Amino acid sequence: MKRYILLIPAVIIMAACSKKNNPAPLTPATAKATDLVGKWTITADTLFLNGSNQFSVNPVNGGPYFQFNDDGTATSGTAGGGVQGVYNYTVNNGTLVLTIPNSGSVAGSEETLSIYNITKSSLGLRSNNNNNTYEDAWLTK
C-alpha cells in the first residue's frame, strides 16, 4: 500500500513533464516546402503601382494551377490544357523560388516570389515585375 502512495505522485509528476507537440503557427516566415504540397488553383491576379493603390484586379478563369509535389518538383498548367511548365522549388523565410531546369539547348531560369499570406487552403504570392509595379496572385487549394 505504501508503494502505491509513492507511485501516484511519481506518475503525476511524469505526466506534467511530458512534452507537448504544439507546432508553430503557419505564417509566411515559418512556411516550408511541405506546406505547399498539393494542387493550388489561381483565382485572382492583382497589379499594383509601387507607392500607390491597386491598379487592376483580374479574375482568373480557365483553372490555371500549380501542383507542388513533396519531392521538391512542381508543375503548372490549366484545367483544360494540361501541364505547361515543370519546375523545382524551394521555400525559405517567406520566399518561394521556382527553378526551370536546363532543357537541351535552353538554359534554365529562376523566379523568386514572396509569400505574403499562407493558410492550409489559401496562398498569396507576390512578384516584383519592375521598379514601378508588382503583382499579387491569390491561390486556393
Image (spheres, helix red, strand yellow):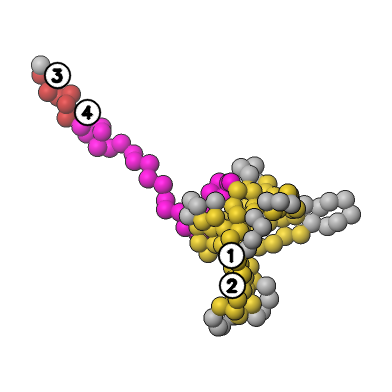
Q: Tell which tag, 1 or 3, sits nearer the viewer.
A: 1
Q: Mark 4 belongs to which amino acid? A: Val
| Contact check, label 2 and label 1, Cβ < 8 Å | yes
Q: Which residues are magenta?
A: 11-38
* Mark 2 neighbour density, 10 Å: few (under 14) some (14–19) many (20 or more): some
To which residue does mark 3 refer?
A: 3
To which residue does mark 1 refer?
A: 44
The residue at the point 38 percent across, 41 percent down is 21
Gap in Å between the C-alphas at discs 1 and 4? 55 Å
* Mark 4 neighbour density, 10 Å: few (under 14) some (14–19) many (20 or more): few
To which residue does mark 2 refer?
A: 57
Gap in Å between the C-alphas at discs 2 and 1? 7 Å
Disc on the earlier residue, 2 or 3:
3
| Contact check, label 1 and label 4, Cβ < 8 Å | no
Magenta span: predominant SS is: loop
Gap in Å between the C-alphas at discs 4 and 2? 60 Å
